[in-house]
Amino acid sequence: MKLAVVRVRGNVRITSKVRDTLIMLNLKKKNHAVIVEDTPHINGMLKLVKPYVTWGPADEKTAALLKNKTGLPPPRKGYGRKGVKMPFKKAGAYGDRNEKINELITRMN
């Protein structure tokens, strides 16, 4: 299974360990997105950088959309009602979105 990962926060006040992990995921700037395989190694990396990214399983349309793009504009109508400092389960932006990641990436195009 493929996961779509989108970075939602910038570089201010992050530790070097988190910064290096984001670079390994090829998420160097805010609003960048990548498609990665769903492996235990990647899941551990996502757990470490959870407050800075949002992710979910990507469908074929989303994967094709992101194949040639990395940097995206911010999503129309924002990330969530409470912003990027709250988890998705509490109406924020970061963390696991499940199937709703496809809607977010569509709004970012």
Image (tube, rainbow, N blue to C red):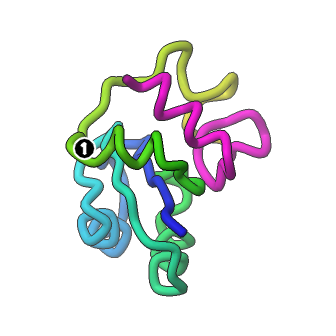
Residue carrying label 1 = 70
Residue 79 spot, x, y in % from top left: 56, 28
Q: Which quadrant of the structure image shows residue 20?
A: bottom left
Query: Element type at marker 1?
Result: loop
Name the residue furthest top. Answer: 77
Q: Which residues are magenta?
A: 87-109
In the image, residue 88 lies in the stretch drawn in magenta: yes
Q: Residues within 10 Å of mark 1 (few under 14, many from 20)?
A: some
Q: Residue at x 36, y 52 (%)?
A: 13
Residue 106 spot, x, y in % from top left: 48, 28
Relative placement, left or right, of 99 versus 107 is: right
Q: Is residue 90 above or below residue 78?
A: below
> Which amino acid lies under the numbered mark 1 shown in the image of this protein?
Thr
Q: Residue at x 40, y 49 (%)?
A: 63
Relative placement, left or right, of 10 versus 46 is: left
Q: Is residue 43 above or below residue 67?
A: below
Residue 51 spot, x, y in % from top left: 54, 55
Q: Considering depth in this image, is 89 or 72 the residue closer to the camera?
A: 72
Relative placement, left or right, of 16 versus 59 is: left
Q: Is residue 76 above or below residue 68?
A: above
Q: Considering depth in this image, is 2 or 95 the residue closer to the camera?
A: 2
Q: Residue at x 62, y 53 (%)?
A: 95
Q: Residue at x 26, y 71 (%)?
A: 24
Q: Considering depth in this image, is 72 or 94 the residue closer to the camera?
A: 72
In the image, residue 31 lies in the stretch drawn in magenta: no
Residue 93 spot, x, y in % from top left: 60, 38
